[in-house]
Amino acid sequence: MSLISYHSVDIHQQEAIVLENVNLEIGEGEFVYLIGPVGSGKSSLLKTMYAELDIHGGQAEVLGYDMRHIRRSQIPALRKRIGIVFQDFQLLIDRNVHDNLDFVLRATGWKERSQREHRIVEVLEQVGMETKGYKMPHELSGGEQQRIVIARAILNKPDIILADEPTGNLDGETGKRIVELLRSIRDTGSTVLMSTHNLSLLDIYPARACRCENHSVVDCQS
């Protein structure tokens, strides 16, 4: 079953063409790399999947939503089913790890405090950060911050994880541990689409790879 289905899709940034004639099918339970150099359109493609960037031309469906004609009122429901892992973390620097996670749960409709507390404990254990809830973001290493970002992304048990260069700011060993964590999350049922320009990761953790180059998405196969 396809969770992401793009056919002849064009993607623009303002007036410039970023990608054109994109054809992409990603199914349930897959781990897929999106590779290519910086500036090749990887981030723009991911942004179209959570309605941060409009699509021009073609047909695009994500989790049953028509991404060319999605209504603004539908976007929160779509995003609740998608976990986003940013390269630059985007944690709230004025509150600790626990409160960063609680903020997201409250914003996405978790009203019962006891349920929020239970879910925060669950995700921190899942990413190996169960003792870090009291820490402020600046007290964590880059790898630890990225684990918290992944914990934030899985709070609502999303169908899809979109990870945009999640190892880009990390050293090699820490980056490998982040990929291992994302693969373990895939094994719990979430589809993972991870962009990277670090091709050595594909040798260590083989998976299907789609390449962005020359304004196209090519070689989208195992």
Image (tube, helix red, strand yellow):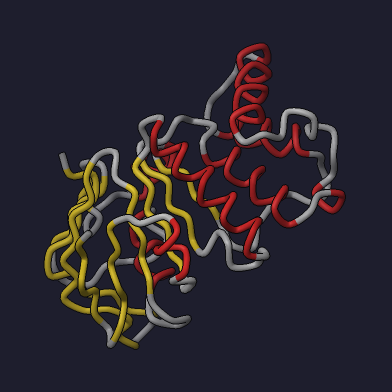
Count all numbered tags in the image, as a single digit.
0
**Which residue is drawn at the image coordinates 54% and 32% (left, top)?**
155
Name the foreground residue: 101 vs 212: 212
Figure quadrant of residue 147: top right
Where is the N terminus found, in terms of image quarters? top left
Up the image or down, 9 lies above or below 80; here it is: below
Figure quadrant of residue 100: top right
Direction front: furthest residue: 204
Q: Is residue 31 left or right of residue 221?
A: right
Q: Is residue 186 left or right of residue 198?
A: left
Q: Position of residue 48 (x, y in %)?
A: 34, 62
Where is the C terminus found, in terms of image quarters? bottom left
Q: Position of residue 193 (x, y in %)?
A: 37, 54
Q: Is residue 70 left or right of residue 171?
A: left
Q: Position of residue 92 (x, y in %)?
A: 74, 49
Up the image or down, 149 lies above or below 111; here it is: below
Q: Position of residue 151 (x, y in %)?
A: 60, 38
**Which residue is drawn at the image coordinates 27% and 51% (left, top)?**
70
**Which residue is drawn at the image coordinates 56% and 55% (left, top)?**
176
**Which residue is drawn at the image coordinates 43% and 81% (left, top)?**
37
Name the foreground residue: 120 vs 31: 31
Q: Is residue 74 left or right of residue 9?
A: right
